[in-house]
Amino acid sequence: MTRTSASVDAPGADAWEGLVTTALLGTDRRTPPGTAPGPDAPLALLDAAAVETVRRRAGLRPARAAERPQAAPEDARPVLPPAAARRLAMLLADRPGPSGGGRRGAAPDLTELLPQWLAVANARGFAPPPQVLPALLDAARGRTDLRPAALEFAGPRALWLARLNPDWRFALRAAPGGGAALPHLQDDDGIRQLWQEGLFAERVALLSALRSRTPAAARDLLVTTWGTERAEDRLMFLDSLREGLGPDDEPFLEQALADRSRNVRATAAELLSALPGSALAARMAVRAEACVAIDHMRSAPPRGAGDDMVGGTTQTTPTIAVEAPHECDPGMERDGVVAKAPAGRGERSWWLGQLVEAAPLGTWSRRLGERTPREIVALPVADGWQGELHAAWCRAAVRQRDAAWSRALLGDPSAPEAGGPGAVSLAERAKLLGTLGAAERAEWVAGFIAAHGLSEAFQLLGVCAVPWAAPLGRAVVDALNIARDAGSYPWSFSGVMGLAERCLDPSEASRLDALLAVPDEPENASPGAGGYWAEAFQRLVTTLRLRAAMAEELGAA
């Protein structure tokens, strides 16, 4: 080892950098210090590197040992059944392919099954196996839509892991207060301390939790610091009062109508208008009644009646007359009416819509001859005001959760009108459906699909409870079968097919077996469409059976 003694004793501060440079250039062009060129040069370079490595390590001062992390918290929930644990590992191992569109094939999309699996597992109250938590957090990191269900299933250990790995810090942000435990709702001192000293996210979480249990206590807590809060914080805190909103909240919300922030005033007015018995709702009713009335002098003939005479008099139907406000006075502005209309919107129609939207819907039966909502909606409206008036009633029905008015505005699902008697868009129809019970909602959408097909049903299907009720599932399958027989490509219905994979009851899989064969293509069919439909139905059937297997595995504890 004599040949390396010089290199061991001699290197200075840049010895390691010199050895790295020699390795990069090669010993044919440069030899280590103290070594002659030749076949021994590479060995000398390795020896010198080994010695220098020891020198560098020995020259480091030992650092103070970091404090060992506390053990992960226990998860008291029942253990996941083995079959379900294997299924979860399979779902987490699947990675979505490139989203380039085109032919999907017959294989199910496992990434879309993971949210459903998590929903069932959370409903059953299972705890995850510890070894899958990293993969679960990685999946939630890449999909924000997955995070609430994934973090609920992961439980307290997800927050423990998130504090050790920066890639999973989103879990701390998603948890109120970064995972800090809220005080017990009977702990008055702890609640007051957290409200006075906590971070904003902790305070929002505290207010929401308290509001869900004892609404009055949450409101009283908010009152204690209301005058000192920032405008954006006041808005968030006020929004939390939607939970458990009731008449007792009216005095506080009336005070908020005079807030410095326009957004806070608007939110307070919206909440008060959702209380039909509030003073603001009464004021809005008086204003709206002054704008809408029955005009018996301007009657319109009933549909199909023409100029038929009954007893020598033309048979007519009363007409709704509208006189929109001519100004937006300070009282209207205080009650939440926005004075400045959006671009392209007339001021008077803008003010009218806000007044009608905020007035209690019970106003109109009294004002318009004790008629039912269905009878009122059926009345003609003079001077082209029908669209504006009905749209405002739609918004009021959604805000006040009034099922009777929603039914009237939706009308019969088989009606030929593109937007229904009152709804101006499919989006509004979807909102109106949200005020109805799950069974009634599914029945209405099934009737709509039977009459109009699937081309406009996507938004309406999105508000239906999962799994779809049997009549709705049958209507969707029948409509898909009709589209297949028409010979068009299934890509036009890819959105509905994707919803069916997630929402159709798995028991419907047996009804689809007859659709798995490639159909005979009519002369005017798109080339190869039958094969694409067979693949699409095969994927749907396979997905439904997988969902059935998942549910069985999760129910086998």
Image (cartoon, rainbow, N blue to C red):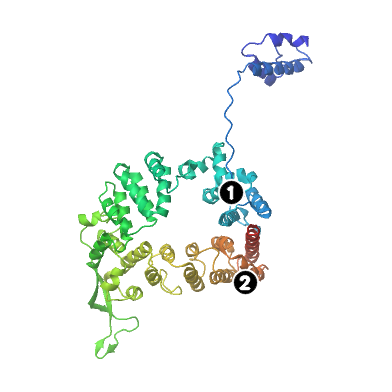
Query: Which residue is disc 2 drawn over?
Result: 523
Within 10 Å of disc 2 (Cα), the crowding (few <14, some 14-19, many 20+) is few
**Quarter the C terminus occupies:** bottom right
- Tell me residue 402's x, y (percent): 37, 67
Q: Are marks 1 and 2 in contact (CB under 8 Å)?
A: no
Residue at the (62%, 67%) spot, across then down: 507
Q: Secondary structure at mark 1?
A: loop
In the image, taking residue 187 as reference, residue 288 lies left or right, namely: left
Mark carried by residue 38: none
Question: Splitting the image into 4 quarters, where does residue 290 fall?
Answer: bottom left
Amino acid tagged 2: Glu
Within 10 Å of disc 1 (Cα), the crowding (few <14, some 14-19, many 20+) is few
In the image, taking residue 294 as reference, residue 28 lies left or right, namely: right
Q: Residue furthest bottom?
A: 311
Question: Can residue 36 be seen at all in this image of the molecule?
Answer: no
Q: Secondary structure at mark 2?
A: loop
Residue mark closest to the camera, 1 vs 2: 1
- Tell me residue 251's x, y (percent): 27, 55
- Tell me residue 343's x, y (percent): 31, 54
Is 362 located above or below residue 334 in the figure? below
- Tell me residue 444's x, y (percent): 47, 71
Mark carried by residue 76: 1
First in sequence: mark 1 or mark 2? 1
Question: Can residue 110 be seen at all in this image of the molecule?
Answer: yes
Amino acid tagged 1: Ala
Is 249 located above or below residue 226 in the figure? below
